[in-house]
Amino acid sequence: MEFSVSCPGKVILHGEHSVVYGRTAIACSISKLRTRVDVVHYSWSASDLSYLVKDLNFEDKSKEMSSELLSRLLGTYTEEERGIVSLLFLYFSIILPPHSTTKKSSKRALQSLGIELILTSSIPIGAGLGSSAAYNVSLSAAFHLIKARLSRKNGGLWYYKKSFNAMELESICQNAFLGECFMHGKASGIDNSICTYGGHLSFKTGKAVPFSLKSKLRILLVDTKVSRNTKALVGTVREKVALLPKVTASILEAMERVSVESLENLKKMDHSDDKFKIYRKLEELISINHELLCAFGVSHPSLNKIVDSANAYGISAKMTGAGGGGFALALLTPFSDNERIERLKKELVNCGFECWESEVGGEGVCIES
């Protein structure tokens, strides 16, 4: 058994932080940035190890997920170790779940399965581009394929399919969400959704709704190379909401209107005769959103520098993700002057930033071979 699966990174266009308070967020996949898992099957059996270390007991003692178990695990491990815990959780919950109805012959094959997982990624870690979600989605997809391949019920046919169906994608997404909870303690669900389904989607109160956009949406991603603490930034917003509920309610409502207005214009783009006007609205909404996020205190001098530099060239930009560093994005429209774009990129690189152009809205999780 040898195959590969991959899934994209993501970028948040609108709704950072406000999505936590039940407002609309808009996310897009970035196919240029992907995480890939190569699966290689080995024929040795894990049960053979008991002959090498006689004291080891390989009985199935897996437990179901519970809030108590999650709390204990998160309090025990470092952030890096939680990634391993997430991998093991996905393995046992998908391939060897407790109370499984899998046939005994298939279960024995799964229990004696030896595999090597080779994970590679071009998604920057901890920068707000979905690195952990892509990790969990790609592992979830790989484990689903492994189980299907060795299941007599399915006859191994799933392994040879070129894509996942809707039910399979839903299962992959749900398991990846639990993996995200293991890694972060709490997850909105937006990251694992966009990494699973790809394309473009809106997200509100736990519900992801894909929308079609055939027009190419081009952005400039800019890495500040400043590390950030997402948990602390979320806490900063929470403190302001608690301290000034009436004022922050207005900010959150403005963020909601920005997201909804942007979503409406994106949906109109494919059929509009006046794309220039739509792009002008999208540019203004991006600029407004950045200022609203600044009002919550989650920006950073490096992000503001990028936004100011872009504005000087007539290009709208904003932070993306939790803020405090990480990445900024600039909207590159069909009407943007290419010479100005190149001059902006050169200026940003000279300031110590890294940047690259990308189209958004590519393929989600997929079987590569």
Image (cartoon, rainbow, N blue to C red):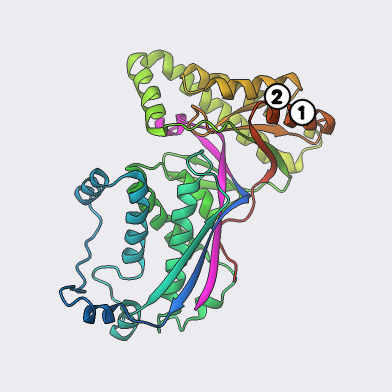
For residue 223, which quarter of the picture? top right
Q: Position of residue 132 (x, y in %)?
A: 45, 48
Residue range highlighted in magenta: 1-28
User: What distance separates the C-alpha of mark 1 from that of mark 2?
Assistant: 20 Å
The residue drawn where x is 52% and y is 29% is: 325
Residue in front for this viewpoint, 236 or 16: 236
The main secondary structure of the magenta stretch is strand
Q: Which residue is mark 2?
A: 310
The residue drawn where x is 73% and y is 31% is: 345
Residue flagged by tag 2: what amino acid is it? Ala
Please say whether residue 208 is visible from this viewpoint.
yes
The residue drawn where x is 38% and y is 18% is: 240
Q: Secondary structure at mark 2?
A: helix
Determine contact: label 1, label 2, CB under 8 Å. no
| Residue 7 within the segment the image draws in magenta | yes
Q: Position of residue 19 (x, y in %)?
A: 45, 33
Q: Position of residue 296 (x, y in %)?
A: 46, 19
Badge 1 or badge 2: first in the primary sequence? 1
For residue 363, which quarter of the picture? bottom right
Residue in front for this viewpoint, 277 or 72: 72
* Disc number lying in front (1 or 2): 2
Q: Which residue is mark 1?
A: 277
